[in-house]
Amino acid sequence: MDNVRFSIESDFYQNEIVFSMNENTSQIYKEDDYLCFSIKAPSSYGNPIISLQDFQIEVFRSGQSSFDIFEYKTNKAKHFVNLFGQSEIFLSFEHTDKILSFCVDILATKITAEQAKNLLDYLSKKMDSILKVCFSKTRYAISPVKGETQDISIMLTHAENGLKLLSRHKNKFKQKKITILKPRLEIQSQRQINNIINNSLLWIFNHLDKLYPVESGNVGFLHISGRNYDIDFIENETLYENSDIYENKLILSYLHEIKNFLHQIKIDLVAISENPRSNDGYFRFEDILSEIKESIFLNPRIKKCNILLKECNQLIAFINRYLPCSLVKGMRVKITPPVRANQHYKQLFLYVYEWQNFGEPNWQGENYLYGLRTLWKLYEFFCLYELIEGLNKVGFTLEYSESRQFFRESGFEGIKYKNENNPANFYSFKRDNLKIELYYEPNIWTYTKEYTKENDLIDVLHDGKGERSRFSPDFLLKVSDSDKHFLVVINSE
């Protein structure tokens, strides 16, 4: 379709701007620009269809430039109102299946920029809750699944709770520490020694200069060649509490793992110093993101890392003083009999077990939120979270959530797949006998004998077999009880 020409005409531009649809072109426009879209295409393609995000724009035929090339135009209007950031324009034709698209970057008015800022501010402050309901794609998730990547915000909270637990039980770790009795040789007063070992006798023979004779009639420590000798101090074996054992080494290893984690997070949290910049009274979406990311996301987490690092260093000093042991990196948790017998050790070891089951850290929630480049997608994400929270508030329990791919071959229900970078797009709720299934951006396909399954939803608005053969609403709720169900289709705007 290289012979299709699409242009945008504006009162603010002297020349018509022409895009070749096979190029990755992005132009900047203002939200309140008066614009007219113009298309030149072969007559065999049929009438063009222009869609801007979820909205279809009326197109009328304006002329004929040659024998088989027709010209089409839209009315001049503010087509980009409320579309802030990167927005996609879709172009298709009646008699072809292919959909052409390209992006435009839209500068917002102050009012729209404030809207986006308020939404980002709200969602940023709710990030911990968002991670639990939108990015925890597992059934009945209570503890981390071994080896799966874990969002860094959750890991920070987990590390904070582990450090608090150890701080809270410091007195117990001092008074009821796990140790073993271990022998060692030390110099003692011979009058305090009850049992002499072979090593002590060997030490005496190597230190005969320490012996001195005693007066006749007095009992000495040693009797040699008919004479009595005494000695004040000798080396002998004594038992002492040794804390250099597995249980304490694991705690020290855990603290150093957290310390290294916090240091790395501080390196990753590169502060963004940009503030929202006005372009003659208009704002870029990236600038709003930068401001919120710095004030709500970066700065608080850097501050938290500094606080936790200080606490971690204090606890390492505590272990070195009261439970001195050698550092062994990479130790794994095992619940030994002494750990089972000491509740404060057992509680901490369970935290360490969860920590060690975390996979590679990532910023999945933050990357998604601050990776958004358009206001309409931000609206959708906001509505997704509010729908989930709203169902929770009226008594529905989230049973599980997961990511699904909605291919034609898989039918309306879709198939489960692993996706750690985006929020889950299927949620199952229950309250008594009532069940609600929430689909985020599902695909509802046109009927085909080959793939349409029993009870599948069917798109009756479109025809064809390509991309135009499906309807994809923002949200679909399937509400059911024991004998009936109904559907609710919701658009975020």
Image: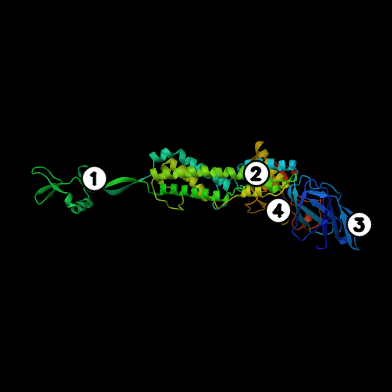
Give the amino acid type for the residue marked by disc 3 in the picture.
Gly
Front position among marks 2 and 1:
2
The label shown at residue 406 is 4
Front position among marks 2 and 3:
2
Classify mark 1: helix, strand or loop.
Answer: strand
Task: Using residue 189 as the reference point, say whether residue 42 is left or right of it.
Answer: right
The first of marks 3 and 1 along the sequence is 3
Front position among marks 1 and 4:
1
Give the amino acid type for the residue marked by disc 4 in the picture.
Phe
Q: Between marks 2 and 1, how big is the CA–CA gap?
A: 68 Å
The first of marks 4 and 3 along the sequence is 3
The C terminus: image quadrant: top right
Q: Which residue is mark 2?
A: 292
Q: Between marks 4 and 3, how big is the CA–CA gap?
A: 40 Å
As drawn, 124 above or below 447: above
Q: Which residue is mark 1?
A: 188
The label shown at residue 63 is 3
